[in-house]
């Protein structure tokens, strides 16, 4: 079996406690392997669809998109500073992309990363059928190993 190299790890974060729950176990792994972490926040430039028939996508205004980018960067900087205080090497990246999972997959390939580490929100039932699972899409679409962590209920 080939050795798994963990020099660089992509960590998608969506500003939720569930997504951040991955950082606990990942911090230990990163210390052990001396991995460099890249925190990723994806902004979608589409608000949703209109109620018109047929429905069409409604774009986020450019000013609002810039505000979301700045807020996302501030968020990642705070998380990165906390990880750096623990002795970890961390970079941050905010990306505007159509679809969270496709954007994560593109960043994993583009960045020549060794691992994608992410939490799953554990959506089930109708919500999962309707929206799909970002983690599931990343697992199925990635050419890289994907480490998925599901926080215990109520402990995110």
Image (tube, rainbow, N blue to C red):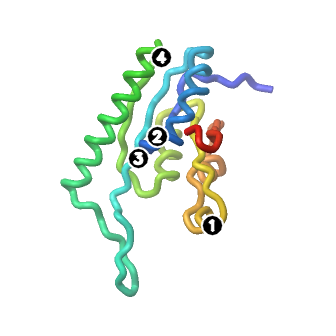
- Residue 124 at what x, y percent from top left? 65, 59
Alpha carbon distance from label 2 to label 3: 8 Å
Question: Which residue is situated farthest in the front direction here?
Answer: 154
Nearest to the observer: residue 151 or residue 118: 151
Tell me if mark 4 has few (under 14), some (14-19) or many (20+) residues whose alpha carbon lies within 10 angstroms of its own: some
- Residue assigned mark 2: 13
Observer-nearest of 156 and 67:
156
Which of the image's four quarters has the N terminus? top right
Residue drawn at x 39%, y 52% as measured from the top left: 97
Q: Is residue 37 left or right of residue 54?
A: right
Q: Residue at x 40, y 26 (%)?
A: 80
Residue position for label 1: 129
Q: How far apart are the alpha carbons under marks 4 and 2?
A: 17 Å
Residue that badge 4 annotates: 88
Q: Are marks 1 and 2 in contact (CB under 8 Å)?
A: no
| Vertical arrangement, residue 124 with respect to residue 106, above or below | below
Q: CA distance from mark 3 to mark 4?
A: 22 Å
**Dot 4 lies on which element?**
loop
Looking at marks 3 and 4 on the same chain, the residue that comes earlier in the sequence is marked by 3
Residue 57's x, y, as percent?
Answer: 36, 71
Q: Residues within 10 Å of mark 1 (few under 14, many from 20)?
A: few
* Residue at image coords 42%, 42%: 15
Q: Which mark is residue 42?
A: 3
């Amino acid at each position: 079996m080939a050795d798994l190299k963990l020099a660089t790890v992509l960590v998608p974060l969506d500003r939720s406690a569930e997504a951040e729950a991955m950082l606990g176990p990942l911090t230990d792994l990163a210390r052990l392997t001396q991995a460099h972490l890249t925190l990723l926040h994806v902004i979608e430039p589409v608000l949703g669809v209109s109620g018109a028939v047929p429905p069409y996508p409604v774009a986020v205004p450019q000013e609002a998109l810039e505000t979301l980018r700045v807020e996302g960067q501030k968020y990642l900087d705070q998380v990165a500073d906390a990880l750096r205080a623990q002795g970890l090497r961390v970079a941050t990246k905010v990306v505007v992309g159509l679809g969270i999972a496709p954007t994560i997959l593109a960043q994993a390939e583009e960045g020549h990363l060794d691992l994608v580490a992410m939490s799953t929100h554990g959506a089930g039932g109708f919500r999962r059928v309707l929206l799909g699972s970002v983690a599931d899409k990343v697992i199925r679409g990635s050419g890289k190993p994907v480490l998925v962590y599901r926080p215990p209920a109520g402990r995110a």
